[in-house]
Amino acid sequence: CKNWLAMANDRCAFSTHGFSVVVCRHPGTGKYLAVNESRGRGWWLPAGHVDRGQTFALAAVREAQEEAGIAVTLKGLLAVEHSLVGPSEARMRVIYYATPTDPDAPLKSEPDQESEGAAWMSTAELETLSQLPPPRGLRGAELLDWGRYLDAGGAVFPLSMLQGEASGPRAALRDAGIALGGGGQSLLVPAAHRP
């Protein structure tokens, strides 16, 4: 697999690096969990590499605890992204929607190797930070973009959409109440799965 363009007829070992990303919204204030990244990288989402032997969901919960200092409850999926980054390498990111397990729990305030701390921020506050460069501003627009998406009523998909390999849909997926409409062209998400 040395020639990127000639891969159509070749088979080669393929490695995928997994990452979990957490978009956490406070149920009382509607603010979003922002992490002040270590090494002066700016404000971003709790996120990180899925460790060996870990599921995407476990990595998401771990990253929120390590970077923001709080436990989160995963409520749904926002996206699953898969990007080729080379002839035999890819990145896969699972973006979760979450809420704090305890809305009154204090956020991390002591810097360590994981982050400088965390804060709850409104989309207006995130917009202000998007005008500043790191370390005072946002690392990138992703947290602001997800906040805008959710504030506009964007869909949150059931956690059961991400399942282990199986022969067809697992019971949790079958029971999720998802209806396909328009000949399978659109996915209707029940109101119970919207933020």
Image: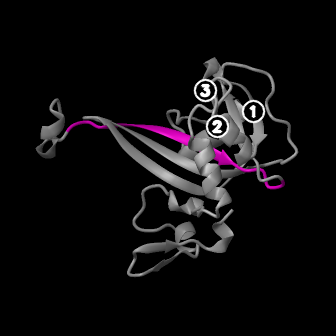
- Residue 69 visible in the displayed image: no
Q: How many marks?
A: 3
Q: State which tag comes first along the sequence, 2 or 1.
A: 2
Q: Is residue 30 left or right of residue 170?
A: right
Q: Is residue 71 left or right of residue 44?
A: right
Instruction: Tell me the CA gap for discs 1 and 3.
Output: 18 Å
Counting other residues with Cα less than 10 Å from the Cα at mark 1, is it few (<14), some (14-19), or many (20 or more)? many
Counting other residues with Cα less than 10 Å from the Cα at mark 3, is it few (<14), some (14-19), or many (20 or more)? some
- Name the foreground residue: 186 vs 112: 186
Q: Which residue is painted at 68% across and 58% down in the image?
A: 151
- Residue 88 visible in the displayed image: yes
Residue type at numbered disc 3: Pro
Q: Which residue is painted at 17% across and 29% down in the image?
A: 2
Can you name the residue that lies furthest to the bottom here? 182
Q: Which residue is mark 2?
A: 46
Instruction: Tell me the CA gap for discs 2 and 1.
Output: 9 Å
Magenta residues (range): 12-28
**Mark identifier at residue 118:** 1
Residue 175 at x, y = what percent? Answer: 58, 74
Q: Secondary structure at mark 3?
A: loop
Q: State which tag comes first along the sequence, 1 or 3.
A: 1
